[in-house]
Amino acid sequence: MPDFEPIVGRYLTMETGGESVRIYVEEAGDGVPLVCLHTAGADGRQFRHLMTDPAVTDHFRVIAFDLPWHGKSNPPVGWHDREYQLTTAAYKQTILDFCRAMELERPVVMGCSMGGRIVLHLALDHGQDFRAVIALEGADRLEAFYDIDWLHRPDVHGGEVAAAFVSGQVAPQSPDEFRWETLWAYMQGGPGVFKGDLYFYWVDGHFDDLSARIDTERCPVYLLSGEYDCSCTPERMLATAARIKGSKATVMEGLGHFPMSENPAGFRHHILPVLDEVRTLGW
């Protein structure tokens, strides 16, 4: 018999930012909606291990979508006449519009890396719309540590150099199978997309002067960072948690910047207790 996974993929056309966009969505499971946001330059495949774990899908409707320009989602019509550059405002609006289009009632939203940053913005500005936010490798302020101009040049293979940049953020303990699966998604990224995402991640997304205003009574906040993450380091995550009163922080031993894809078993150990707690939160 065919060995099909329980993940279902389909396309959604929706409006955001005054444009019509065609979004690729995957989901699995039933229960509390859990929207998963991928890292910069990658796509929703990073969450496939969560989507095939009955300990998660027996209680959560896990939904992962590729942002416009990413993975199987198309860029907007006329993309060839513009430079892609992700802003905080556009990122927030895309997520809000997606949740409305999917008719999700106060979902949990979990993001990694740039997704981990944006969920904190959502908790600040739209906390009433979410049951909780889970920031993986997320902080309210970061500092660039490499030159992003290398990521979009005609004499450099953008996908390969993107994978090279992020390869050092995978923990040394992560199994080779999943390390290379994570890097493969970066090798397939569209021209200039990783660079455009990093505008939000390194420049536009800072809000350490505002993050203390997040009301965790209204929207609980969980932060988890891998000990080998040299991008959003545990120190930066813990500093963010200290500013957000009532947030809960965890440093994940033996994990790097891509916990859900680079080491699914190791990540499972840390995320299942968080999800179990989130399930007890009232609507």
Image (cartoon, rainbow, N blue to C red):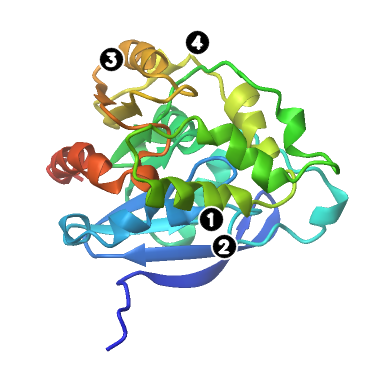
Residue placed under numbered mark 1 in the picture? 66
Sequence order check, earlier mark of 4 and 3? 4
Does any portion of residue 99 appear in the rendered image? no
Residue sitting nearer the eye, 39 or 173: 173
Q: Amino acid at mark 4?
A: Asp
The label nearer to you, 2 versus 3, is: 2
Residue sitting nearer the eye, 178 or 201: 178
Density class for disc 3 (Cα within 10 Å; few <14, some 14-19, many ≥20) is some
Density class for disc 4 (Cα within 10 Å; few <14, some 14-19, many ≥20) is few
Sequence order check, earlier mark of 2 and 3? 2
Compared to residue 95, the image places residue 86 above or below, namely above
Residue placed under numbered mark 3 in the picture? 245
Q: Amino acid at mark 2?
A: Ile
Does any portion of residue 26 appear in the rendered image? yes
Sequence order check, earlier mark of 1 and 4? 1
Density class for disc 2 (Cα within 10 Å; few <14, some 14-19, many ≥20) is many
**Badge number at residue 209:** 4
- Where residue 158 appears, as percent x and y from the top left, is 72, 44
